[in-house]
Amino acid sequence: MSGGISGPLAGYQNGLREKFSKLAAEKFLELAERSGVDVEANRRLVAETDALESQASSARNRKILLGLLAAAGFVCAAVCAVKAHGGAEPLWPWIAGAAAGAAAGIASIPFFRNVSKRLDDLRGRIAENKKTGWRQMEPLNRLYDWDIPASLMEKAMPEIVFDPYFTERRFLSLGGLSGLDGSSDETKSTLSTLTGVLNGSPFAFVRNLEMEWEEETYEGTKEISWTELEEGPDGKTRRVRKHETLHAYVTKPVPAYHERTVLVYGNDGAPDLSFSRVPSGFTGKDGNLWSAIRKKWRLNRLDAYSRNLDDDSNFTLMGNKEFETWFHAKDRDDEVQFRLMFTPVAQVQMMSLMKDSAIGFGDDFAFIKRKKTNIIVPEHLRDAALGTDPATFRSWNFDAAKAFFSDFNERYFKNIYFTLAPLLCIPLYQETEFKTLEEGGAGARDIPCRRECEAAANYCGEKRFKPEGCITRCLLKTVRVPSGAGEDIIEVTAHGYRGEERVEWKEATGGDGKRHSIAVPWTEYLPVEKTSALRCMRRNAAGGREETGAQPTPGGRIFRDFILGG
């Protein structure tokens, strides 16, 4: 168990990392053997291509050098010819210079042409070799699927089981928890999902594209001029023309788009407790004077807050002051359940996780608990892969594919594992399961939920659904429309904004003492939307497609029961 007494950090360092790395290497070898790819032939082709690319690089450098030499020669000839034509004395050096420059430029041309031809030939051979490499690797490239990283994680960690995709059943089992609600909110759209159970309790990784209104400042300018009388150094009065650029500004709302990844986890442990905490910023700063001052100040504030009997808070500082300083769950509302959740063992494990700056990611996570709902928001998942498109692994180079396969899967495992790690630090959560809702209608509940449909639509790309005139990103919202005959329709509505150019006039006083009107152009963002339809064909009982020409769509792992088409 990765969440035992040793803690998730030690569990990862002392066994899980190596175990997963071995499983990933074995999986690639298995795929390679199944594909029947001639590895040695591919390696010879790659070696030959590398040699050709080295030659092409040298030829490219020679071509640039010869081009510069020819250009320099002709420029020199032109300059000398102009000087000679202008009658510069003595005349003969300029004539000689013009002749030498022209000769150098002309002499370089055949070499330049030969090198260019050589470079074109090398580039053609490289392109052909890569085409051959893609043909060689095609049997292996076809074997990659969405399941690979998740299936490897399940083998490495038996306590975790991933769903094939985000089903209506899983969404309902999480009870519409606060981290997942707002599925009809037009300010967010789901980009990718990854769901399952950890020690019997459900979780969902969800990456959303979210829109919020921010402000943008627009600037307008106006050039003015006027005449003033000034006394010169000679004592005489003269008219002087003055110039000034006036500036004016207006601030207007603008839609801003951000990607945000959260982990939502349901557990019945400490069911009445709520709290929140954000990253402390202390990781890796032991011995730092400013960090020590911040810790001392924070602890003093917590101690004073604990002693204050004039408010409604029942906050009581625990004996482990270091844990209180780092975790800083000041807004907790049930001291008994907080101590039940964060036992001495949990405190030690959480501190090890937060203080680490070498193995994992340290204290980079926000932790929000709202009764049975737990939300983890980690910084390290901001730009990390959550979906695992099979195209990610495809390559024409066997050894490069092998190295990338191991590196990608190991990074994927680390990113997911250390997002779950704060939950694994809590023994209460490993011993308590989440009592899910009874949904009824089992078969019907295995359909993809709305968030999964949004992920599928986003995988197709915003451009496919973008409304005419839209100048911003689009939030895609979906509605699944069952139509029978082994087919469903997903209605995708893209919400975006078009821009209307406006002008606002502002006044400013110039150096001439007059008030001037300044035009400030700005953009007004007006909502636009467009609804499109996607056909989805179910797989048949044997797992095949009921209609050809369809393409797989992404889920947390793979959108298995529905295949995008049309």
Image (tube, rainbow, N blue to C red):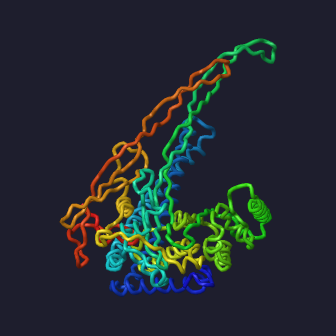
Left or right placement of residue 476 versus residue 178 in this view: left
Image quarter of residue 563 = bottom left
Res 395 seen here: no
Q: Residue furthest top?
A: 236
Front residue of this view, candidates 23 and 266: 266
- Image coordinates of residue 192 in percent, x first then y, are 42, 64
Quadrant (top left, top right, bottom left, bottom right) of the N terminus = bottom right
Residue 159 versus residue 317 in the image, above or below:
below
Instruction: State the image coordinates of residue 123 (x, y, percent, origin top left).
Output: 39, 67
> Where does the image place residue 422, in percent across and percent down from the top left?
59, 73
Depth order, front residue of 435/200: 435
Count of residue discs: 0
Is 308 situated left or right of 346 in this image? right
Q: Residue at x 52, y 44 (%)?
A: 78
Q: Which residue is drawn at 59% across and 79% down?
A: 427
- Considering the image in quadrants, where does the C terminus appear? bottom left
Q: In this rendered view, identify the residue nearer to me: 467 or 316.
A: 316
Q: Can residue 532 be seen in the rendering of this structure?
A: yes
Give the quadrant of residue 361: bottom right
Q: Which residue is found at the position 57% from the left and 48% from the top?
A: 97
x and y percentages locating residue 48 in the rendered image: 42, 78
The residue depicted at 56 percent of the width and 31 percent of the height is 220
